[in-house]
Amino acid sequence: MNRRTFVRRLGGGIALLAGPPLLLGLDAGRRGLSQAALAPTGQHPLRPPGALAEPAFRAACSRCHICAGVCKVGAIQLPEVVLGVQPQLPVPLGSSRRPMEPPRWQADGTPFVLPWKTACNLCMTCGEACPTGALTPIPADRASVARVRMGAARIDPKVCLPWTQVSWCGACLTICPFRGEAITVDHRSRPRIHAEHCVGCGLCVEVCPLRHKAVAVLPEFEPDSGRVRPE
């Protein structure tokens, strides 16, 4: 029996010992499996709060899906792959340059948070339920949550309504659990991200009213193939 099989069975055994809530969560997580998720332009999947660095996370995660089952808002998703959209640059006629390959994240059975669908509400239940330590348990008090780093938000001033002077918005500021620290607005009501205080929950992405989101959360890990063209 290899290590991954052993850990997966161990996680299942812990779920059985823990009683019906985790069993129901495990079943709910498995029902949430999907073939692929499509990320809007410029968006990135995130790991749940408390996740180890990407290589260590993939090695430690037993694919038990308990985290998805206990997630209170259904933010933790289990797609087989996340397919991004690569903004295409025009290729001059006769040029040998190929169009850029769209970014692609292979989930390999591991959980993602897709903030453009449902962002993390920072309840920290997933870390407490993780049987392998792939997700580090984090207390739900404000000081502990403030140290979470799922990624860092970035505002696109070419799209954001206040930045383009189309209208006032304020959605991201209103929803941010650390507003006044992670997001502030200037004297013209234009939002600004302060990465040192941003936990990367993605709530600002979820509530952004624009079809082409004006804000994205950038995690530390890169796509498994393709690359995201810098704006």
Image (cartoon, grey):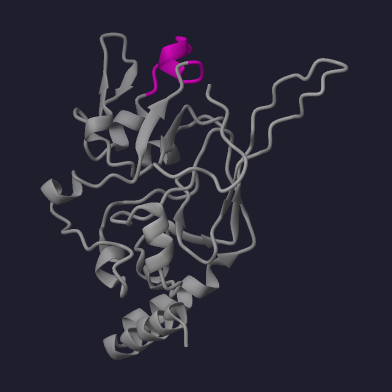
Q: x and y percent of residue 183 in the render? A: 27, 28
Say which residue appears at 19% left-offset and 29% top-offset. Answer: 181
Q: Residue at x 42, y 37 (%)?
A: 218
Where in the figure is residue 188, as x and y percent of width and height? 31, 9
* Residue under the point 31% across and 62% down: 135
Secondary structure, magenta segment, majority class: loop
Please check the rendered image and state whether residue 167 is part of the magenta-colored stretch, yes or no: yes
Q: Nearer the viewer, residue 136 or 21?
A: 136
| Residue 134: quarter of image | bottom left
Which of the 4 quarters of the picture holds residue 70?
bottom left
On the image, the x and y values in percent for residue 9 come to 41, 86
Say left or right for 196 vs 172: left
Q: In the drawing, does residue 1 fall left or right of residue 39?
A: left
Task: Using residue 31 as the reference point, say whether residue 133 is left or right of it.
Answer: left
Q: Is residue 75 above or below residue 165?
A: below
- Residues shaded magenta: 158-169
Position of residue 116 measured from the top left corner of the image (x, y, whole percent)? 49, 43
